[in-house]
Image (cartoon, grey):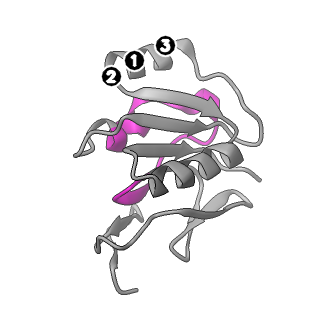
Amino acid sequence: MAGKSIQGSGVFLDQQHPDDVLLVEGYGGGGFRLMGRRFEGGVIVLPGGVYPIEAKDIASLTLDDFAKALNADPKIDLVLIGTGARMALVPSALRAKLDAAGIGHDIMDTGAAARTYNVLLLEERRVAALLLPVD
């Protein structure tokens, strides 16, 4: 697994080489595939890494699930929120917290969020995707 590091019990993948591009290669069956590695459950994907989140569905999302995006350096301009098989609204209190943190966000189904993230990342935009799993 040259160019990648997997550490700790909370499995994550960090970009180790500038040519590594963390594109979402696939989704479904309750997880995601990035750089040939399978991740079960929800994830937050940034240009420099992919990290598991606690939320299993839209109702269980908290600001903590966005921590990697909120603390990213360089700052993330936009977080795409993939809400599962269908687009669903993020609770208004959580949207207000994201607004207060100065993070733009867009809500869509997980498939659309994954595809949009890939396009924006290839355009070298400062984007992240919080993706809830699809069965």
The residue at the point 29 percent across, 74 percent down is 17
The residue at the point 61 percent across, 30 percent down is 107
Picture coordinates of residue 133, whole percent (x, y): 66, 49
* Mark toward the start of the polypeptide (2 vs 3): 3
The reply to whether discs 1 and 3 touch (Cβ–Cβ < 8 Å) is: no
Secondary structure beneath disc 1?
helix
The residue at the point 63 percent across, 51 percent down is 115
Q: Which class describes the residues within 10 Å of circle 3: few (<14), some (14-19), or many (20+)?
A: few
State the residue position of label 1: 99
* Picture layout, residue 35 above or below residue 79: below
Secondary structure beneath disc 3?
helix
Q: Which mark is residue 93?
A: 3
* Picture layout, residue 57 above or below residue 96: below
Q: Which class describes the residues within 10 Å of circle 1: few (<14), some (14-19), or many (20+)?
A: few
Residue 127 drawn in magenta? no
User: What range is drawn magenta here?
Assistant: 46-69
Q: CA distance from mark 1 to mark 3?
A: 10 Å
Picture coordinates of residue 62, whole percent (x, y): 46, 29
The reply to whether discs 1 and 2 touch (Cβ–Cβ < 8 Å) is: yes
Q: Nearer the viewer, mark 2 or mark 3?
A: 2
Q: What is the quadrant of residue 27 in the picture?
A: bottom right
Q: CA distance from mark 2 to mark 3?
A: 15 Å
Q: Quadrant of the N terminus?
A: bottom left
Residue farthest to the front, as pictured: 123
Picture coordinates of residue 76, whole percent (x, y): 34, 39
State the residue position of label 2: 102
Picture coordinates of residue 127, whole percent (x, y): 42, 44
Q: What is the quadrant of residue 97 in the picture?
A: top left
Type of the residue with mark 3: Ala
